[in-house]
Amino acid sequence: MLTLSSNNRSRVSLWSTLACCGALLAAVIMPMNTALADRLVYVYSPDCGACMKFDKEVGAIYDKTEESTQLPMIKIELGRWQQGDHPLRQCDTKDVFATPTFIHLQDCIEVDRITGYSSDELFWFALERMDNRSKEYGSAVAVE
C-alpha cells in the first residue's frame, strides 16, 4: 500500500484538480471556437422532397467544392434544430420553420439564409449572393 505524506497528498490533489479543470475547459472552449468559424448550416427534414433533391444534386459534391473550404456545411435535422439539440445552439439565429433552410453563420451570427431548393443552378447562384453579402457584413463590422 502506498502512503503519501500530507505535503505529497496536497500536490497530488492539486494536479488532479488542474487536470480535471483543464479537461473541462477544453471541452467548453473547443466547441465554442468551432461554432465561431463561418458555417453554412443546412437544416433538413428526412421526408422533405426538396432536401432529398438537394442531397442528390449538391450535397453529394459540396465537400469537394471550393465553396466548402470557405463555408463548410453542417447538416442538422429540423427537429434537433428546433429543440436546440445541436452544437450551434448558442448562435444568434432566427427560427426555422421550413426545410431545406441554409443559414450562413459568421462569427456565430446569422448573416443570410436561403429557404427552399429547386435546382443546383439556383442554389449556387444564391450561395454566391450569400458570399457577396457576407463580405458587405464583414466590412460593416470592421468599420464599427
Image (cartoon, rainbow, N blue to C red):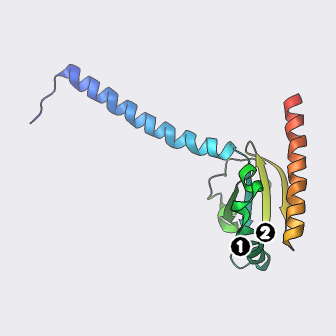
Whether residue 123 sits left or right of residue 82 in the image: it is right
- Specify whether 137 is left or right of 61: right
Q: Report whether 74 appears left or right of 17.
A: right
Q: Which mark is residue 45?
A: 1
Residue shown at 61% from the left, 59% from the top: 85
Q: Residue furthest top?
A: 7
Q: Earlier in the sequence, mark 2 or mark 1?
A: 1
Q: Residue 100: which numbered mark, if any?
A: 2
- Quote the CA–CA distance across marks 2 and 1: 7 Å
Disc 1, SS: loop
**Discs 2, 1 touching: Cβ within 8 Å:** yes
* Identity of the residue drawn at 70% across and 61% down: 64
Residue 32 position in % (x across, y down): 62, 42
Name the spot of residue 19 as percent of width and height, x first.
38, 34
Seen in the picture, residue 97 relative to 131 is either above or below; the reply is below
Where residue 105 appears, as percent x and y from the top left, is: 76, 49
Residue 96 appears anywhere in the view: no
| Quadrant the C terminus occupies | top right
What's the residue at 85%, 31% (across, down)?
142
Q: Secondary structure at mark 2?
A: loop
Is 28 located above or below residue 97 in the figure? above
Q: Position of residue 42 (x, y in %)?
A: 73, 62
Q: Which residue is more in the foreground, 84 or 53?
A: 53
* Circle 1: residue type: Ser
* Front residue of this view, candidates 80 and 116: 116
